[in-house]
Structure formats: C-alpha cells, structure tokens
Amino acid sequence: MQEMHIDSVDHLARSIIALGTRYPDGHIIEPHYHRRGQLISGATGVVVLATPQGTYVMPPQRGMWIPPATEHHVRTVGAVRMQSLYLEPGAVPGMPTHCQVVGISPFMRSLMTEALGLPIETELDSRAGALMELIGHELQKLPVLPLSLRYPAEGALAARCRKFIQKPEIHETIDDWAADLHMSRRAFTRLFRRETGLSFMAWRQQACLVGALPRLAAGEPVTTVAVDLGYENPAAFTLMFKRAFGSPPLTYLGMRGGHANAR
C-alpha cells in the first residue's frame, strides 16, 4: 500500500491518486478538507465521519464518498485499514456534491487494490491508464447505502436533529417534534422533507442505524443497543436492520460468519 499523505503528492498530474492508510482504534482526525474528492474504503473497523451537513458511518468492506473541499472530522471504531482514491475535481463526471456512504463491490475493491500497487511518481503505462479509466467508470455506479444522515442547514430544526442523533429513539413522532418546534404537523412534514430530503420516519430510522453501528462495532450487545433505541426486544431491532441491509447486525459488520457482501 502507498502510505503517504495526499498533500505530498497532490501536485502530480494524475486524475486519480490511490493511497493506503492504517489507523488505530479510537483515532481522531480533526476537521480538515482536501482539494480533491476522496473515496475511502476500509477492510476492517468502522469510520464515523461528521461534516457541518451531516453524520456518516462506514462499516467494513463499504465505502464513503467525500466531495472536494468538504470539511470533515473522522473517528475510527476498531483498527481501520483504509484505501483511498483522490480524484481531481471534475475528473469523473456526475460524482455527488455531498457525502455518501456507498457499497463497494468485490470488483471495485480489486480495482482499488491494483491502483494502490502503481508507482506514484512515474508515468502511467497503457495498462495503468486503462485501470484508472475503468475505475472512473465504476465510480459512477456506486450504490448508495442508508448510512448518511443529512441535517438541515440551520435553525431550530437543525438543532433538534443534532440533539436527536446524540440519543436516537425509534418511538419519537412527528407530533412530538412539531410540538417542540411550535409548528403544525403539516408545516413540519413539509419543512422536514425539504430540509433533509427524507420523510421524518425514514430519517428517524437512518438516525437509529447511524447511532447503532459504531456501538455494535465497539462490542456492545445487540440487546443493549436495541433497548436504548426504544425497541421492545432485540428481535424487532434485528428485523429492521435486516430490512435495511439484508443481513443481521453482527453479520453485516463482519463480526460473525465473516464479512457480508456489500450491497
């Protein structure tokens, strides 16, 4: 793996630069940004990323897209072995303008691993050039996973959303929030969808998933996490989780029966 900081090679005339990094459990990277866009993927551990616009959780064997010049704060849960692709702004058409957690197929993972083996400061030969071109095509096909939690830009609703993510609870209702914000139910639902891009119930479920994954990855029992989120029993939480991701929590995190396939 090419283990170096992007700032030392950012000047190179490469549309895509592949680098690898290792971080210990509990590592914190203070708020920063990169000139290039960044796609990260971790073979192990969980990455929790926060921006002024939202919170994003990347489980093992998945990925996360960070647009150019996006300020972000990073925390790791478990040791993380990370692969990163740094994209020159505009090099790959159609990349999202906000952070997203994405699925990484075995094929895409293999392409990233091959790219990490390329010499950084030498001209790309025809094979390497074809590899980077193929990576560019695959970057446009990454499926979005429900582990991105966007916040409203500002105001009382933004503050209420940030408060909720500190202690998510599956039984909080539209009426609870509308009353807190002194709004009618109809006005609240319109505002919430306009500001977050989701219905309240969909956002609430994603908030519970985003809150649960780092705790599960850190070894907290499913029962404890489920009860804290307001589920009557762990089976109800596991059912919700399987509907969202296709497998139970510990399997999805690679903590039982090996890593689940990326979706």
Image (cartoon, helix red, strand yellow):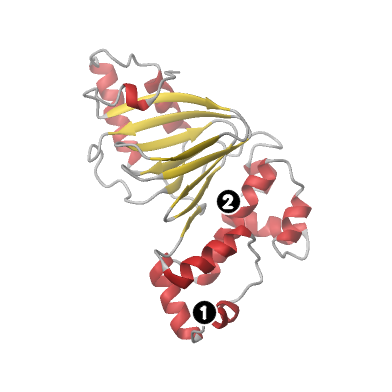
Direction bottom: furthest residue: 184
- Report the number of numbered marks: 2
Relative image position of residue 121 (x, y in whole percent): 28, 14
Check disc 2 and give the amino acid type.
Phe
Q: Secondary structure at mark 2?
A: helix
Q: Which residue in the structure is indicated by mark 1?
A: 181
Against 183, residue 25 (above or below) is above
Residue beneath the point at 42% across and 54% down: 52
Pick the quarter of the image with the N terminus: top left
Residue beneath the point at 73% across and 64% down: 231
Relative image position of residue 221 (x, y in whole percent): 77, 47
Check disc 1 and give the amino acid type.
Leu
* Nearest to the observer: residue 72 or residue 212: 72
Residue beneath the point at 49% across and 84% down: 183
Q: Is residue 223 left or right of residue 48?
A: right
Relative image position of residue 255 (x, y in whole percent): 69, 37
Against 88, residue 208 (above or below) is below
Against 175, residue 202 (above or below) is above
Q: Is residue 159 left or right of residue 24?
A: left
Q: Secondary structure at mark 1?
A: loop
> Marks 2 and 1: which is nearer the front?
1
Relative image position of residue 244 (x, y in whole percent): 57, 56
Q: Which residue in the structure is indicated by mark 2?
A: 245
